[in-house]
Image: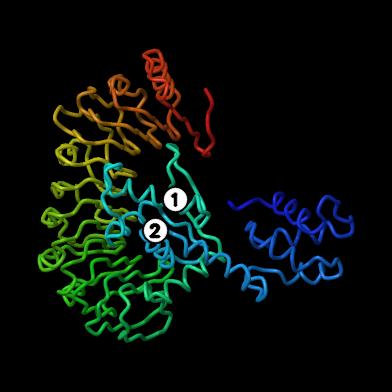
Amino acid sequence: MSFINEDQSWELLQHKVFGQQSCPLQLVEVGKKIAKNCGGLPLTIVVVAENVMREEVWENVSENISSREPTIALQCSKILCFSYDRLRLRLKPCFLYIAAFPEDSEIDVSKLLRLWVAEGFLKPNDGFKCLEDVGEHYLEDLVKRSLLLVSRKGPDGKLETVGIHDMMREICLAKAEEERFLFNTNSSTYFIENPCRRLLIHSIDDFWDEESRLRSVVISPRAYYYLSRLNLRSRHICILDTSMVRWRKHSISRFNNLSNLQTLGTVVDFIFAEEIIKILVHLKKLKVEYHTRDRDFNLENIFHLHNLEDLHISMHSRACGSRIWYHAFPMGLKKLSLKGVHFGWENMTIIGSLPNLQVLHMMDITVHRASEWRTKEGEFLQLKYFHSSLDLVVKWEMEKEHFPCLETLILEGARRIHEIPSGIGEIDTLQYIELKDCKRPFVDSTKQIQKHQHENGNDAFRVRVIDSDGEDVLF
């Protein structure tokens, strides 16, 4: 069964305890408290009901009931284990990987899918276009089985974040350790000799990996580290998921065994020195943040990461704000996200010429004067998703041939531009436009595009308008 709300929990508890009779009025308040503390898990409610058939024990149960109460936890755990044991073999590692995420966290689906791909959990299937599509299918299967919870969906109906019930997470952690799938460490100093392939680090000052078969290292996003304290010697590492790790200039050069690394993020003030580029030769995904001003981070060397497919660059406090971005990006990029970067719209050919680019985010771009943006034919040939704040753009000129594959357009805080290009409405593949905090003339011109699309029989085309408070505007 799926998870249920408080009202449904109370109805189920009443039914299991009293059958067709109503709950005595003096027990309603305490009964609702019991139902609420079951956390929306029908199984817990049923087990609790079997243990509280006598009215005199209700008050005590209401104060002490939780998914970790020994008797209830034991019975529920035995039943929940069946849900895992009956999973298809290919789904088991995907589920166990949830143990790598902190308790009560919203798990970013795109990140989870990338990790599954990097781990090799997903296999090609004739029914799906790419491995990410296979991953989405697996994820939906886990949700249908109530092993995972839906936290948030996007405007297209796809899952954006998922979660896991506390009791199910306990099962996940126990199975991951039992099967030596993933090892959790909270020790201040750790020396690894066990044969596990994946390590989750929650809190650690120093770490030594003595030639193990370690494949993946995930550092909890609730921690803050200096990589110079990590000594990784495994020849098998292909995933290093670091959250807000500061990389000193030569720290990564101490780890030549990271040549198989495919995923790296998020790192702070990363310096793209030549010796580092040579080590990260197989890197596919990279996320970096910059907080320091006026330093040379050798950003021009990004171009030499030839296998890079997914790149996120975020600059805070106008870091490097005085330097206009004119560097080339790796030609194999499929996804690019720029935030706070000083990038003139006249330089967009640098991005538009990327032959494989499908997803582009450009938010809070640093520009010093109002600009006009004129796209060119032969650019953005594969772009499907474009999300931008169009900073200081006062006019955007384009033709439908300039974005032949565009499916989703999200414009956020575009306050200087008064009209959406008419060519947008002629793009055959476009299915969705979202406007956040845009001026009324811009919204009105977008309405005309929606009207035109519907008149031409494209009833699936949608426009969503959101005001500055995040509320939907109906029109």
Quarter of image, res 47:
bottom right
Q: SS at mark 1?
A: helix
Tell me how far mark 1 sits from mark 2, CA to CA.
Answer: 9 Å
Q: Which residue is mark 1?
A: 141
**x and y, in percent, of residue 230 in the image:** 28, 78
Q: Tell me where residue 440 appears, x and y as whole percent.
A: 45, 24
Q: Which mark is residue 63?
A: none
Q: Quadrant of residue 280?
A: bottom left
Q: How many marks?
A: 2
Determine whether label 1 and label 2 are within 8 Å by CB: yes
User: Which residue shows up at 20% across the image and 72% down it?
Assistant: 252
Q: Position of residue 448 (x, y in %)?
A: 40, 17
Q: Position of residue 156 (x, y in %)?
A: 42, 37
Determine which residue is flagged by label 2. 91
Amino acid type at image mark 2? Leu
Q: 224 left or right of 356?
A: right
* Colour treatment of the image: rainbow
Seen at 38% across and 19% down, the residue is: 458
Q: Residues within 10 Å of mark 2 (few under 14, many from 20)?
A: some
| In this view, 354 is above or below 438 | below
Left or right: where 74 falls relative to 302: right
